[in-house]
Image (spheres, rainbow, N blue to C red):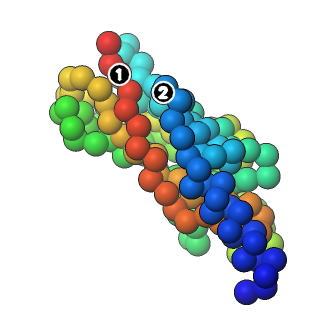
Amino acid sequence: MSARKYLQVGFLFLVFTSACEAGNRQTLGDAATFAPAYDKKTKILSVHVKLRDGLHAYAPGETIGKPVTLVVKPQNGWKASGDVQLPKGKEKNLKTSGKSVIIEGDFDVKTHVEGGRGPVLGELHLQVCSEDACDRPRIHPFEVQVN
């Protein structure tokens, strides 16, 4: 691997590992932000993700990268009922990995939840990449208050 590639991978690693939490809005360095929410009326748990320009995540159907997923943790009795609604994504020919199914910009991941009391705990599984390099897949835990 060239020195330039090491620097690119190192930079992305630093960007993604500098994650911080601000209330219910989570940030992944300057790569992306995500905001979990629960709609009491519809019982839908959703996570709104906003990727920085030039970055992408992977959608269902991707064979090389790790597609985005949403996991509802069983604490407090909550469970997902039904399929997780994921963005469809689009096929794109990437410089280093060939054809991939990617998501760019803003997107939502949703699922119907039931059976619990108290906060909903979950995880957003996300791998963020540029045209040239990828961060490793990461798990981003969150908590949503249900009032």
Query: Would you identify the image quadrant in which residue 63 lies?
Result: bottom right
Q: Residue at x 78, y 85 (%)?
A: 2
Mark 2 or mark 1: which comes first in sequence? 2
| Crowdedness near tag 1: few (<14), some (14–19) or many (≥20) residues, C-alpha within 10 Å | few
Above or below for 41 versus 73: above
Q: Is residue 131 left or right of residue 88?
A: right
Q: Residue at x 21, y 27 (%)?
A: 116
Residue 102 drawn at (x, y percent): 67, 56
Q: Which mark is residue 24?
A: 2
Q: Amino acid at mark 2?
A: Asn
Residue 104 drawn at (x, y percent): 71, 47
For the C terminus, the quadrant is top left
Q: Amino acid at mark 1?
A: Gln
Query: Would you identify the image quadrant in which residue 106 lies?
Result: top right
**Which residue is label 1 attached to?**
145
Residue 20 drawn at (x, y percent): 54, 41
| Crowdedness near tag 2: few (<14), some (14–19) or many (≥20) residues, C-alpha within 10 Å | some
> Could you say whether the residue bearing mark 2 is in a helix, strand or loop?
loop
Above or below for 111 versus 42: below
Q: Tell me, yes or no, if residue 20 can be seen here.
A: yes
Q: Residue at x 37, y 32 (%)?
A: 143
Query: Would you identify the image quadrant in which residue 11 lies?
Result: bottom right
Above or below for 17 versus 117: below
- Mark 2 near mark 1, Cβ–Cβ under 8 Å? yes
For the N terminus, the quadrant is bottom right
